[in-house]
Structure formats: C-alpha cells, structure tokens
Image (spheres, rainbow, N blue to C red):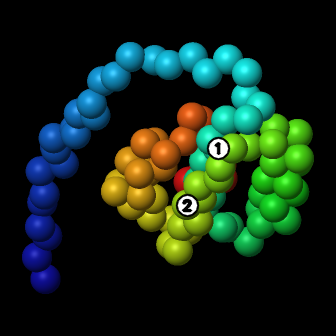
Amino acid sequence: MSIQLLDPTGRVEKGRSTPERRIGVLEGKRVGYIFNQHVSAIAFWKGLEQALEGKLSPLSLHRIYKANTWAPAPKADVEQLLEQTDFAVVGVGA
C-alpha cells in the first residue's frame, strides 16, 4: 500500500468582464431559467415559472433544465441563454 500526495493548487479560470446592465421593468422581457431539477424543488419551480410568466408576460422563454443535478450547467448552454435573454432566474444549485 502506498500514499500518494497531490498538489492541491490550481489555476482559477477568469471570466470575461462585462459592464453591468440594468434591466428596469421586467414585464415583456426575454426570460431565462436555469434549474437543476432536484426532486425536492420540482413542484416549487413549476409554480414559480407559472407565476412569473403570468405576472410578467415575457416576450420569450429560454430554459436550461440540467440532466445531472450535481454538475454545473454546460457553459455553451449558459452562454446561449445569456445572449438570448434579458434576465435569468437561477435556482436550487443550478
């Protein structure tokens, strides 16, 4: 039996820096959702989406429902959501 030591240091990925955008009124905007589909929150999330859609009358919807509860949402999907929406609702460990 042997003990293997690993160097715990790593390189932190730097995200691109963009100026903050203020969206003002939320009604009639393009809405995005990112949800991990955890069984304990499915009913809540469905109700949240219905309430937001009824109140805000969004121009369009874009959803990312993760296939793997514990893994991050795919970067390409998140970038597409950012391009196609004015704001996003992210929940439950997404």
Mark 2, secondary structure of its residue:
strand
Foreground residue, 8 or 29? 29
Q: Quadrant of the N terminus?
A: bottom left
| Mark identifier at residue 31 | 1
Inspect this view and state whether residue 80 appears.
Answer: yes
- Above or below, 30 against 76 in this view is above
Dividing the picture into quadrants, the one containing residue 59 is top right
Q: Nearer the viewer, mark 1 or mark 2?
A: 1
Counting from the top left corner in percent of width and height, residue 45 is at 78, 57
Residue pointed to by mark 2: 64
Dividing the picture into quadrants, the one containing residue 19 is top left
Inspect this view and state whether residue 89 appears.
Answer: no
Counting from the top left corner in percent of width and height, residue 74 is at 39, 60
Q: Is residue 79 left or right of residue 70?
A: left
- Above or below, 22 against 8 in this view is above
- Amino acid on which disc 2 is placed: Ile
